[in-house]
Image (cartoon, rainbow, N blue to C red):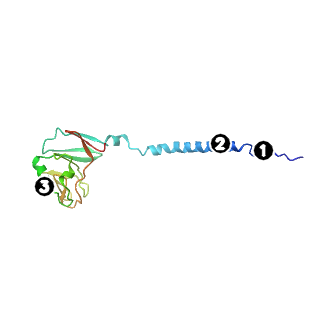
């Protein structure tokens, strides 16, 4: 018997083998992406979170000296329509423990917009004529949301907001 040079195991076309390897890798990559897509998609914010991303507030119903509380991203927001006397008093001081000029805390002197959570333990302060008092540990804030006394380390936080019109604000990033 003579030996044949073609035993059936030798590759016939190396270019075909390279092509099949490339196609197999591409299909495997597409399969991995398809398998991971639900997991990646689950990281997007849900529709109820997106709905609370921005909150529009009509200011026309808030009289001078009154305050309205609204919700933004699950947090209470105080919107205070300040009187001319309050504006003058707040412009004359820089606060207490965390000094900050009133002009840096408001976009329009008539309107103060702050996140209504005490910066000490996250309690909701109560409004009084001088500002706010946190009932849990006694932190006192003025009518600009600046900490005057108590254990709170800093002023009430200011959410991102813009005036859409003279009597309407949008709280949240736009």
Where is residue 1? Give x, y as percent.
Answer: 90, 46
Q: Residues within 10 Å of mark 3 (few under 14, many from 20)?
A: few
Q: CA distance from mark 2 to mark 3?
A: 78 Å
Where is residue 121? Give x, y as percent.
Answer: 26, 57
Q: Residues within 10 Å of mark 1 (few under 14, many from 20)?
A: few
**Front residue (pair 101, 76):** 101
Where is residue 149? Give x, y as percent.
Answer: 17, 60
Badge 3 marks a residue whose secondary structure is loop
Say whether disc 1 or disc 3 marks the residue closer to the N-terminus. 1
Query: Which residue carries the number 2 mark?
Result: 19
Residue placed at 26% from the left, 45% from the top? 161
Badge 2 marks a residue whose secondary structure is helix
Does any portion of residue 130 appear in the rendered image? no
Query: In the picture shown, does residue 58 fall above or below 141?
Result: above
Badge 1 marks a residue whose secondary structure is loop
- Relative placement, left or right, of 130 versus 37 is left
Rendering quarter of residue 47: top left
Say whether disc 2 or disc 3 marks the residue closer to the N-terminus. 2
Which of the two marks, 1 or 3, is nearer to us in this view? 3
Q: CA distance from mark 1 to mark 3?
A: 96 Å
- Relative placement, left or right, of 20 versus 160 is right
Residue placed at 27% from the left, 41% from the top? 55
Query: Which residue carries the number 3 mark?
Result: 92
Say whether disc 1 or disc 2 marks the residue closer to the N-terminus. 1
Q: Residue furthest right?
A: 1
Query: Which residue carries the number 1 mark?
Result: 8
Residue placed at 62% from the left, 44% from the top? 22
Circle 1/circle 3 CB separation < 8 Å = no
Q: CA distance from mark 1 to mark 2?
A: 20 Å
**Front residue (pair 45, 17):** 17
Where is residue 119? Give x, y as percent.
Answer: 25, 56
From the image, which quarter does the C terminus lie in? top left
């Amino acid at each position: 018997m003579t030996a044949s040079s073609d035993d059936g195991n030798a590759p016939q076309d190396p270019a075909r083998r390279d092509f099949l390897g490339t196609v197999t890798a591409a299909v495997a990559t597409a399969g991995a992406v398809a398998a991971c897509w639900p997991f990646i998609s689950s990281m997007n914010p849900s529709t109820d979170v997106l709905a609370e991303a921005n909150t529009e507030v009509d200011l026309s119903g808030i009289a001078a000296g009154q305050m309205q509380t609204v919700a933004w991203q699950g947090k209470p927001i105080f919107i205070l329509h300040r009187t001319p006397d309050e504006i003058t008093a707040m412009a004359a001081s820089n606060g207490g423990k965390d000094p900050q000029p009133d002009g840096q805390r408001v976009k329009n002197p008539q309107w103060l917009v702050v996140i209504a959570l005490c910066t000490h333990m996250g309690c909701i302060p109560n409004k009084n004529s001088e500002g706010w008092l946190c009932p849990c540990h006694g932190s006192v804030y003025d009518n600009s949301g600046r900490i005057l006394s108590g254990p709170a380390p800093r002023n009430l936080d200011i959410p991102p907001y813009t005036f859409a019109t003279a009597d309407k604000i949008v709280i949240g990033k736009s």
